[in-house]
């Protein structure tokens, strides 16, 4: 693997950039942990801690407590933190990002719009920012890893992890987000994909999923080797 990564490094001035996508509770953090100790991989976990503390404000909590009032603020901040992640400079040859500015727009903002939480003018403002960012900044992606799950499985995981802000997350909420991820990344009937998609079965438990992680490592080698 390291030999291949060195080759990638010499071929590309920009790191080979992979975004990890999937429903809430699909195991993105666990997936990233698998690569965390690799010296040639820069792992950028989702900035949930930043969302919990924007100058002292817990925007994640605000969003779930009063979505109509706060989801625009929350999604605006998410767009900024995602842009910071996409443009983060690393000397490492591979960069893995948890989520992206793309899923923020195509899954979360879209879902909030469809539920009537965000109204058309607010979505238009977020969308104008989104279009500006993706044309003026280098947010290019080389591979999308889709951690594919069933809504029922992630619902159980969300209940088990019991994150205090997520108490109001319902099975229906996860089903709606699931459908948006599916149409975008699996059926490919909605929006566009910034890169090729590698789909992994993320319903599997912690042990079995290691084989799926291996598939990803192998795929990284095959597309870059
Ligand atoms: N969130 C949101 N809008 C976004 C991104 C995330 O409302 N554009 C919310 C959904 C979750 C929390 O932020 O309540 C964290 O979401 P993720 O699914 O991105 O992260 P998880 O911690 O659930 O990931 P995993 O369990 O897969 O590691």
Image (cartoon, rainbow, N blue to C red):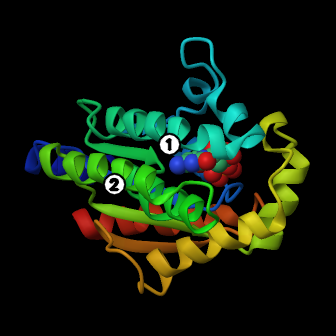
Disc on res. 127: 2
Q: What secondary structure is marked by label 1?
A: helix
Give me the residue at 83% from left, 72% from top. Answer: 152
Disc on res. 20: none
Residue 84: percent from left, percent from top: 34, 32
Could you tell whether 39 is left or right of 162 in the image? left
- Could you say which quadrant of the image residue 85 lies in? top left
Q: Is residue 46 visible?
A: no
Q: Is residue 128 visible?
A: yes
Residue 194: percent from left, percent from top: 28, 65
Q: Earlier in the sequence, mark 2 or mark 1?
A: 1
Mark 2 surroundings within 10 Å by alpha-carbon count, few (fewer than 14), some (14 through 19), many (20 or more): some
Identify the residue position indicated by label 1 in the image: 75
Could you tell whether 206 is left or right of 161 in the image? left
Residue 196: percent from left, percent from top: 32, 73
- Cα–Cα gap, marks 2 and 1: 11 Å
- Cβ of mark 1 under 8 Å from ligand 1: the answer is yes
Name the residue at the top extreme. Answer: 56
Could you tell whether 12 is left or right of 97 in the image? left
Q: Nearer the viewer, residue 81 or 10?
A: 81
- Cβ of mark 2 under 8 Å from ligand 1: the answer is no
Give me the residue at 77% from left, 38% from top. Answer: 65
Q: Nearer the viewer, residue 140 or 64?
A: 64
Q: What count of labels does the image hold?
A: 2
- Could you say which quadrant of the image residue 29 lies in? top right
Q: Nearer the viewer, residue 17 or 70?
A: 70
- Measured along the vertical axis of the image, is residue 216 above or below residue 97? below
Give me the residue at 16% from left, 50% from top. Answer: 7
- Measured along the vertical axis of the image, is residue 189 above or below residue 30? below
Quadrant in which the C terminus is drawn: bottom left
Mark 1 surroundings within 10 Å by alpha-carbon count, few (fewer than 14), some (14 through 19), many (20 or more): many
């Amino acid at each position: 693997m390291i030999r291949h990564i060195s080759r990638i490094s010499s071929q590309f001035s920009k790191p080979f950039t992979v975004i990890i996508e999937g429903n809430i509770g699909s195991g993105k953090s666990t997936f990233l942990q698998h690569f965390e100790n690799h010296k040639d991989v820069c792992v950028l976990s989702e900035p949930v801690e930043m969302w919990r503390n924007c100058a002292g404000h817990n925007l994640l909590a605000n969003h779930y407590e009063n979505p109509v009032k706060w989801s625009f603020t929350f999604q605006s901040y998410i767009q900024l933190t995602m842009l910071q992640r996409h443009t983060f400079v690393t000397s490492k040859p591979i960069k893995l990002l948890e989520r992206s500015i793309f899923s923020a727009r195509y899954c979360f903002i879209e879902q909030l719009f469809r539920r009537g939480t965000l109204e058309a003018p607010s979505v238009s403002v977020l969308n104008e920012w989104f279009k500006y960012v993706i044309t003026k900044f280098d947010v290019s992606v080389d591979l999308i890893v889709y951690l594919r799950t069933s809504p029922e499985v992630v619902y159980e995981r969300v209940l088990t992890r019991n994150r205090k802000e997520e108490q109001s997350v319902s099975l229906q909420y996860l089903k709606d987000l699931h459908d948006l991820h599916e149409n975008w990344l699996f059926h490919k009937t909605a929006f566009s994909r910034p890169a090729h998609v590698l789909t992994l079965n993320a319903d599997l438990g912690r042990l079995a999923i290691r084989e799926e992680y291996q598939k990803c490592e192998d795929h990284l080698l095959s597309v870059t080797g």
